[in-house]
Every structure is written in C-alpha cells, then in structure tokens.
C-alpha cells in the first residue's frame, strides 16, 4: 500500500506543475479565444527575468532598466486606481503620463542608490511581474491590435511568432545559460506518515509548495473570473468580441489585462519549474506537456486545467510504475498524449470545457 | 434634415460640452461616406438626424446600408475594416467620428447589434451586468438599474440564471436591449430588433421600445426591414437604397407615399403586381438623392 500511495502522491504533485502552465493557456483562451502558443516561452522569459535580476552578473543597465519598468508599473497602478476611485480629481492623460514617468525615475533612483546588483526576491518578483505586464502591453500593441477581428487561426499563427521572438529575445537580454533561483524554496525530500507505513511516504517539499501555490492561484482566479466586473468582461469578450465592444468594453484594455494575468501565471509557473529544474531553455518545452492537460480538462475551464493536470500527472506515474515492466518503460513520455487522444475521441470539449451551445 | 453647420459644430466642440441649443438634434449625421477594406463603397453620402427623445426609423432592403450607418455612428465599423472617409457625425454638437465605442457608450450612445449577439456562456443576469461595464457610479446604482430592466422585461427576471445561449430568440433580443439599458444610454441604435422573431414578439418588443422612449427618455435610431411596424412606432423615417437616402419624411407622410407603399409595404394603388413588373417599375422610378 505504501509504495502505491507514494506513486499516486508523487504523480499528483507532478501534475500540479503541469497545471500551472496549463492555467496560463486557459486564461488567454477563455478571454480571447486565442490559443497562445507562446505560453511556454512566457514561462521561460518570466523565470529568466527573475533569476537574472536576483543574480549579480548583469550590466548596470539591466538592473536600472528593470527598476524603471517596476516604477512604470507602480505608477500606472496608482494612476489607474486614482481614475477609478476619484474620477473627478483624476489627472488628464498628459499629467497621468507625467506621474507614471516620475514613478519610473524614482524606481531608477532608488535602485541606483541601493547598489543596483543582486536584488532580493521580494523586489525581483514584483519587477519580473512588471516586466511581464510590459510584455503584455507590447504584444497587444504590436500583434493583437492590428489583427483584431481576424480568424482564430491567424491569431494562433501570430502567437507562434511571438513564442519564437520571446525565446530569442529573453535569451539575448538575460543570457542563455542554466541559472538557479535562490528563492529559498525547500527542495529536499521528506517522509510522511512514517508511523502508518513502513518507511513512510517519500515526497518532495517543492512539490508540496507548488501544490499550495496552485491552490491559491486557482482560488484567486476563480473569484476574479466569476465575481468581478473585469472578470465578467473577460468572459464576455471570449464569447463575442463585437458584442463586447458594442456595450463599451474596450478590447485593447481587456487583452492587456488578460495577457498580463497570463504573464503572472507564467511567472508563478516559472518560479516553481525554475526551482525544480533550474532556469534553462528546456522549461519553454514544458508547455508541450500542458497540451494534453488542456485537452483533458477543457480549454475554457480553470478547474479543468488543475484536475486535468492532476489526472495526467498521476496517470503517467502509475502507468510508468505498473505498466512499465510489461510495456518496456518510457511510458511517461507518451502516456499523456494517448490519454488526450482518447478524450478527443469521446469528449472533444474536455472534461470541464464549456458546453458547445448549439440552437437549432 | 441635418441643419447643424460644420463650422458651428466645430466651435461648439472646442468650447467643451456646452449644452446644445434646444432645436439642435441629438444626433446629426452629415453626408457620410463609408468604405470597407479601402475599396468597397457602401454609403455614398448619408445624412440624417435624430431629435432628442425621438424614434427615427432607418428603412431599406438588404444591403441598403442600414447596419453600416448604425455601425458608423457607434464606431463598430473599424473592427470590420470599414472607415468613414467623408462627412461628419455629431452627437450633442460634438464630433464623435473618431471616438472609440467605449467613449461613445460613456457619452450615452449604444448599439444593439443585429442578430442580438448575447454572450451565450454568460447567464442572462451576467449579460445585463456587462452592459454596466462603463459605469463608475457604484454597485447600488447598478443594482437599481437591474431592477428597472427587470420591470420592463419580467421574462428576463424568471430566466436570470439560465445561460443566455439557451434562451429563446425573443428572450435574447430582450437581453440585448436590457444589456444596452444598463449603460444608462441617452440614445440606442437598434439594429433589426424584429429579425427572426414571431410577429407577436415583434409587437411586444416594439411596445417596450415605445415605453422606454416615453418613460426613460431614450432616443432611438431604428434600422428595420419591417417597414410597416417601424413606421407605426417611429416619428420620422429615412429610406435608404444603395447607400443613399432616397426619401425621408414623417412616419405619417412616408406610409402614405405611393412609392413607399409600392416598394416597402406591398400595397400599391394598382393592386398586386407581378414581381417582373415590380422590378420594371423600380428601374423606371429610380430615386436619386
């Protein structure tokens, strides 16, 4: 019994890691109907930004630039909140940009005065998040806006381009080695329930940490999508771009928001994957494992992404351990895709995907 | 017709949102030309105006340019690669042709699109709430307006928690109009509310439009193919053909006009004519604006 539970638990926890990547896909697909091929690249980019800002090996310009981006994001948040809470006293566009620019300069000044290199995690994580936000703005301006109201396949092709660009761009500015993330996330194995089973159950602390993060993330996202004004608008845009525009939902802003949120999710996934494997190019390929998770869970369901990840993670570990000896091993590499194929045959919208509404 | 001079409009706009003179129309479309994809000329100089608190009908056959006119006003045209290349659109004396749909909704102009376009995977109530996206006057005001919409459309209250995609065509049309109401509009651009609905439902929808107009003071610009129904509820009408206004007048005059009777109401003076004769007649009496 002990080994079986150990395999199941190990599989579930590995599945959580897949779910974290799949979540980013779901967000963008839900809100814009676009399958974002660049999600894996975003995970890599976020992890690289974070790892390199925490190191002290880059040029001063890197750190000052990141500080400016962080200041920009804080300034933007301040101005946006001001406009929302007190529209009467809010600054006009020109003053607003002035305030934002001032924040950026303050960011640079603070970074310069504190000795720029090797940021601690609590500064580097917000900075990486701000960089993902800026990336979202750039993607919206340069790629999505000119392609508004085009076929989904065209937007999909565009995201393939984005993926290649981000892969190259990230490695150009941050470096292309293997870096570690000194966030102090525990990685050592530990034993659970030693009194119940002989020798206990071996789990990795990192996996438990990842599971906790995923749980929090899903709860936050669920509330965001179901209960908030912006979340509702995101779902509206997913259903019908034009109608959403007609009721005054600005598509450009919505896309920036959703790509930013997907960027945050990519950052979280990057932290967890980067801690497990080290920050290196191969985490961009983790996205491929997220595909069967999406097919299983449904492209439009946040809980689906989580449960799909758990099923796939558990399934491939169980298959490896119990079918491996008879089938010759290596099952872990293809099991997920076989499962996805079966799901496509019998339930193409996935386990939790939105029902395809057809009225006759 | 559109009486606001372009020069007067410009000075008024530069002085900020000063209240327009009492006789100025709420919405004035001056001689606009619309081109799709840089080549397809759809509107060839359409002018019309909507007075404050009025219901104005925009009539015409398929492809006459009714929807394009509405989308030009609400600025949904850009998303379809269409462009207003000539003329101007003024709302309360302010040029609005360069604003985004979001800006227009904030100013009180909202379009209810042809074919309803509800958000199928959202519940009816969530659909209505999306209409309040642009508002910044707090949750309680939104709630109050939700009750108002339910008082106009009691049927929506019963179906508030079902997915809009599973409701009937009439309920979807009501949802679409209710959703627009949630933005507190001064003017609704209503595109073919009768499309695909049973005659009894069409009547019900138009009845509600009339009530909204009277009780809430919402002005309507109504694009319709159902000429008979539209002229019964509208105060004034424009007839579009091939991207031009070929005839306009009060609803009473229009419905008495021999040509309108012949072409749009199907009751010409000489009794029923064959389709071939109709085509011939149409060619002979070509209307040019």
Image: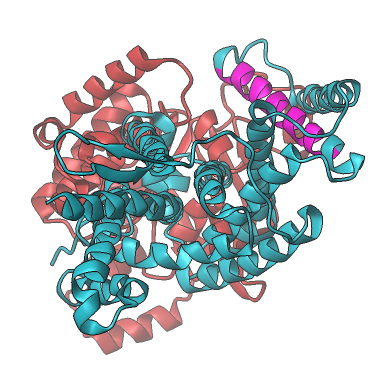
Q: Residue furthest front?
A: A198
Q: How is the image coloured?
A: by chain
Q: Please indicate, yes or no, whether residue B237 appears anywhere in the rendered image.
A: no
- Tell me which segment is drawn in magenta: A65-84
Identify the residue shown where x is 69% and y is 51%.
A138
Identify the residue shown where x is 33% and y is 22%.
B216
Give the main secondary structure, helix, strand or loop, of the magenta stretch. helix
Q: Position of residue B42 (x, y in %)?
A: 56, 69
Q: Quadrant of the C terminus of chain A?
A: bottom left
Task: Tell me which corner region of the image, top left, top right, bottom left or bottom right, holds residue A55.
Answer: top right
Q: Is residue B112 left or right of residue A258?
A: left
Identify the residue shown where x is 72% and y is 34%.
B9
Pick the residue in front: B102 or A279.
A279
Is residue A225 shown in magenta? no
Q: Residue furthest bottom?
A: B276
Q: Please indicate, yes or no, whether residue B28 appears anywhere in the rendered image.
A: yes
Is residue A73 shown in magenta? yes
Q: Is residue A37 left or right of residue A97?
A: left
Pick the residue in front: A172 or B267.
A172
Task: Tell me which corner region of the image, top left, top right, bottom left or bottom right, holds residue A71.
Answer: top right
Q: Position of residue A215 (x, y in %)?
A: 34, 36
Q: Position of residue A210 (x, y in %)?
A: 41, 41
The answer to whether A130 is drawn above or below residue A315 in the figure is above
Chain A hue? cyan
Q: Is residue A37 left or right of residue A30?
A: right
Pick the residue in front: B248 or B83.
B83
Pick the residue in front: B97 or A97.
A97
Q: Which chain is red?
A: B
Q: Position of residue B34 (x, y in %)?
A: 61, 63
């Amino acid at each position: 019994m002990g080994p079986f539970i150990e395999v199941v638990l190990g599989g579930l926890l590995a599945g959580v890691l897949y779910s974290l990547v799949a979540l980013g896909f779901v967000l963008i697909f839900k809100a814009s109907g676009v399958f974002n091929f660049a999600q894996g690249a975003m995970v890599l980019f976020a992890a690289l930004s974070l790892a390199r800002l925490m190191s002290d090996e880059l040029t001063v310009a890197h750190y000052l630039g990141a500080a400016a981006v962080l200041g920009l994001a804080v300034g933007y948040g301040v101005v946006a909140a001001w406009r929302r809470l007190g529209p009467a006293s809010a600054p006009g566009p020109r003053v607003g940009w002035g305030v934002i620019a001032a924040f950026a300069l303050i960011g640079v000044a603070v970074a310069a005065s504190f000795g720029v290199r090797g940021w601690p995690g609590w500064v580097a994580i917000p900075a990486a998040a701000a960089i993902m936000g800026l990336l979202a703005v750039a993607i919206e301006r340069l790629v999505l806006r000119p392609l508004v109201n085009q076929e989904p396949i065209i937007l999909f092709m565009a995201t393939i381009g984005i993926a290649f660009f981000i892969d190259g761009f990230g490695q150009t500015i941050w470096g292309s080695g293997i870096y570690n993330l000194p966030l102090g996330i525990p990685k050592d194995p530990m034993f659970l329930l030693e009194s119940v089973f002989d020798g206990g159950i071996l789990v990795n602390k990192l996996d438990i940490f990842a599971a906790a993060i995923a749980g929090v993330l899903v709860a936050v996202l669920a509330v965001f999508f179901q209960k908030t004004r912006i979340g509702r608008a995101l779902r509206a845009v997913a259903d019908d771009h034009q109608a959403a525009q007609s009721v005054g939902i600005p598509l450009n802003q919505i896309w920036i928001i959703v790509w930013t949120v997907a960027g945050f999710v990519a950052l979280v996934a990057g932290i967890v994957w980067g801690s497990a494997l080290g920050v290196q190019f191969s985490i961009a390929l983790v996205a491929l494992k997220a595909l069967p998770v999406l097919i299983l869970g449904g492209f439009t369901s946040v809980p689906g992404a989580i449960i799909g990840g758990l099923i796939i993670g558990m399934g491939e570990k169980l298959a490896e351990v119990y079918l491996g000896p008879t089938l010759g091993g290596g099952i872990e590499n293809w099991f997920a895709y076989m499962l996805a194929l079966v799901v496509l045959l019998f339930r193409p919208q996935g386990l939790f995907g939105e029902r395809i509404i057809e009225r006759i | 017709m559109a009486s606001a001079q372009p020069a007067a409009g410009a000075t008024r706009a530069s002085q900020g949102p000063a209240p327009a003179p009492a006789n100025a129309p709420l919405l004035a479309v001056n001689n606009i030309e619309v081109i799709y994809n840089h080549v397809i000329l759809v509107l060839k100089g359409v002018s019309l105006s909507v007075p404050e608190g009025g219901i104005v009908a925009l009539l015409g056959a398929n492809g006459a340019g009714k929807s394009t006119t509405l989308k030009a006003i609400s600025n949904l045209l850009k998303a379809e690669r269409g462009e207003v290349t000539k003329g101007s659109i003024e709302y309360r004396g302010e040029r609005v042709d360069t604003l985004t749909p979001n800006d227009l909704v904030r100013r009180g102009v909202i379009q209810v699109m042809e074919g309803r376009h509800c958000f199928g995977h959202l519940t009816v109530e969530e659909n209505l709430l999306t209409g309040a996206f642009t508002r910044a006057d707090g949750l309680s005001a939104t709630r109050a307006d939700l009750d108002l919409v339910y008082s106009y459309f009691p049927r929506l209250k019963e179906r508030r928690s079902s997915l809009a995609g599973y409701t009937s065509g009439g309920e979807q049309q009501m949802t679409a109009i209710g959703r627009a109401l949630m933005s507190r509009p001064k003017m609704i651009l209503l595109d073919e509310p009768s499309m695909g609905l049973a005659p009894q439902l069409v009547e019900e929808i138009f009845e509600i439009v009339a009530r909204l107009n009277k009780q809430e003071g919402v002005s309507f610009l109504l694009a319709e193919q159902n000429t008979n129904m539209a002229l019964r509820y509208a105060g004034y009408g424009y007839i579009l053909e091939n991207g031009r206004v070929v005839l306009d007048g009060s609803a009473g005059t229009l419905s008495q006009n021999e040509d309108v009777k012949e072409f749009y109401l199907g009751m010409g003076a000489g009794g029923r004519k064959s389709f071939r004769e109709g085509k011939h007649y149409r060619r002979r009496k070509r209307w040019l604006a």
